[in-house]
Image: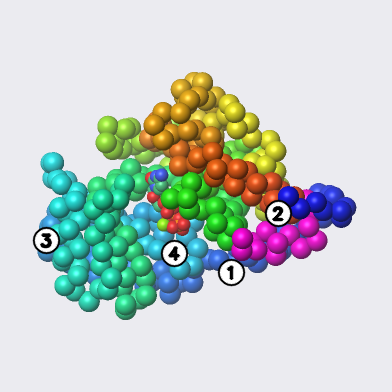
Amino acid sequence: MRVYKRQMRCRSDIDRLNGQFLAIFDSLIPPEEEKAKQKQLLTLLEKLIIKEWPRARLYLYGSCANSFGVSKSDVDLCLAIEEPDINKAEVILRLADILQSDSLQNVQALTRARVPIVKLMDPATGISCDICINNVLAVVNTRLLGDYARIDVRLRQLAYIVKHWAKTRGVNETYQGTLSSYAYVLMCIHFLQQRRPAILPCLQGMEATYSVTVDNIECAYFDQVEKLRDFGSHNRQTISQLVWGFFNYWAYRHDYTDSVVSVRTGSILSKREKDWTRRVGNDRHLICIEDPFEISHDLGRVVDKFSIRVLREEFERAAEIMQYDPSPCVKLFEPY
Ligand code: CTP
Ligand code: MG
């Protein structure tokens, strides 16, 4: 760990970084033409798919649909087929076959992955995309995240900065035991729910205006978010203060021994009440983030005893940089 001899940055010094963080946020927003190209690809795929499965629907999910997608993100698609007992591996192979024969490139069927997908690249738009089958829960949690983003712009700003940091520092790799982008966005939502005054409400704790049952899970929440546009206005914290606070929380304040971050309840739960106190199979629960709908799912389950150290060192590094480094907006995003 690097030791900084420089003076500690006070609150007004942190505020002075705000313009720089906003400029980074702006630079990451995808240009309109990129959105148009994604739509173009979606239309092409729908046309091809509907011939084979006339009653199927193709949904955009993940960062292209929840407004947390930076420029040049891959497109996540879900093919929803309402037929009983479908064999996902067979559908994946058939889908790959259909798409292969069109003008698409690098079509790969990954039937053995935890979530089986077809991967492809569209040469016309240069966009890469993954298509999964019947992962409707992901479509619904995408909607929830997108609705949170419409309440207060600071969520999108904070999540963009945190995701950008995680990607450049190599801690956004689930196959290496660090966290998914989805987990980081949930951590940001939770952090903003916890500010005093709160910047975000707990939508699942309010009267439900949207409700759907997926895989026997009832997904319900208040989705009339246009009525909540002023929710966070009593809290004037700037994005630079929030970035500072986020890293400070995960570096020094989060109780890794006993706490579970829960967007569903807008609070911290204990590992005891979730029964996440011991390792079961590969789930070690070393950092606990509850999925808002699939509540037995800990998004930190990919983290092992090595990667938890990497993660915590990275949070501490980021917190130190925000507190002491003379040029934090450069240092924070230095490739590892
Ligand atoms: N997802 C999920 N459960 C997980 C991981 C992901 O349900 N354990 C779903 C979520 O709907 C999420 C989507 O898969 O929005 C894509 O996940 P991820 O790639 O982590 O997030 P993106 O927002 O697409 O981020 P990126 O821009 O890095 O692609
Ligand atoms: Mg994605």
Q: In what quadrant of the picture does the C terminus appear?
A: bottom right
Identify whether 194 is placed above or below 110. Answer: above
Residues 45 and 180: in front is 180
Q: Which residue is mark 4?
A: 73
Q: Which sits earlier in the primary sequence, circle 2 or circle 4?
A: 4
Q: Which residue is mark 3?
A: 52
Q: Which sits earlier in the primary sequence, circle 1 or circle 2?
A: 1
Disc 2 marks a residue whose amino acid type is Ser
Estimate the x, y position of residue 6 in percent, counting from the top left. Answer: 87, 55
Q: Which sits earlier in the primary sequence, circle 4 or circle 3?
A: 3
Question: Label 1, label 3: how many angstroms apart (C-alpha)?
Answer: 40 Å
Q: Secondary structure at mark 2?
A: helix
Q: Which residue is mark 2?
A: 240
Question: Label 1, label 2: how many angstroms apart (C-alpha)?
Answer: 16 Å
- Counting other residues with Cα less than 10 Å from the Cα at mark 3, is it few (<14), some (14-19), or many (20 or more)? few
Is 60 positioned to the left or the right of 305 in the image?
Answer: left
Which segment is the magenta one?
322-336
Q: Residue at x 46, y 22 (%)?
A: 275
Determine whether label 2 and label 3 are within 8 Å by CB. no
- Counting other residues with Cα less than 10 Å from the Cα at mark 4, is it few (<14), some (14-19), or many (20 or more)? some
Q: Which sits earlier in the primary sequence, circle 2 or circle 3?
A: 3
**Residue 27 bears which disc, if any?**
1
Question: Label 2, label 3: how many angstroms apart (C-alpha)?
Answer: 50 Å
